[in-house]
Amino acid sequence: MRRGEPAVPSNGNRSRRRKATVRATLRALGDGEPDSHTDDGRILNMEITEKQRAIEALQALPEQATIEDAIERLCFIAKIEEGLRQSDAGQLLSHDEVKKQFLS
């Protein structure tokens, strides 16, 4: 399998489940998108800027968090989002290809 080819034939379900799991994890950490519904069920605007996402991630940190904690959290979010963008673009590697890269 060549770089950029999907690791497995995708019917889209696996990728959607993985993205939903990652986004749910980010929301649980206080780093995800805001809840898209109000208490009465109305849908809110889901657009959020990168700056606002960073601010929300930092606000979710405990009061005793260090600058290193903040940097680690922001880097974590950036890496997850980059991985999701690559997945959306079909830039995936098979498990075997990753093993080859690590062993060479």
Image (tube, grey):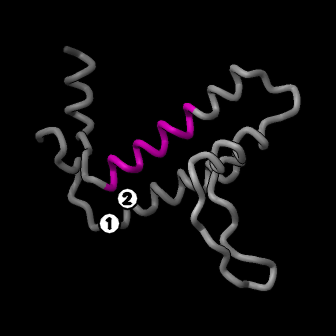
Residue pushed farthest right?
Answer: 63
Secondary structure of the residue carrying numbered label 2: helix
Crowd tier of the residue under label 2, counting other residues whose Cα lies within 10 Å: few below 14, some 14–19, many 20 or above: some
Q: Which residues are magenta?
A: 75-88
Q: Which residue in the structure is indicated by mark 1?
A: 12
Q: Nearer the viewer, residue 56 or 22?
A: 56
Q: CA distance from mark 1 to mark 2?
A: 5 Å
Contact, mark 1 vs mark 2 (Cβ under 8 Å): yes
Amino acid type, label 1: Gly
Secondary structure of the residue carrying numbered label 1: loop
Residue 61 drawn in magenta: no
x then y, percent, for residue 69: 71, 25
In which quadrant of the rendered image does the N terminus lie? top left
Residue 100: mark: none
In which quadrant of the rendered image does the C terminus lie? top left
x then y, percent, for residue 21: 54, 55
Question: What is the chief secondary structure element of the magenta stretch?
Answer: helix
Q: Residue at x 37, y 50 (%)?
A: 85
x then y, percent, for residue 64: 87, 26
Crowd tier of the residue under label 1, counting other residues whose Cα lies within 10 Å: few below 14, some 14–19, many 20 or above: few
Q: Residue at x 63, y 72 (%)?
A: 45
Q: Is residue 95 left or right of residue 1?
A: right
Image quadrant assignment for residue 65: top right
Q: Which residue in the structure is indicated by mark 2?
A: 15
Q: Residue at x 73, y 22 (%)?
A: 67
Q: Nearer the viewer, residue 57 or 19?
A: 57
Residue 78 drawn in magenta: yes
Amino acid type, label 2: Ser
Q: Residue at x 60, y 59 (%)?
A: 48
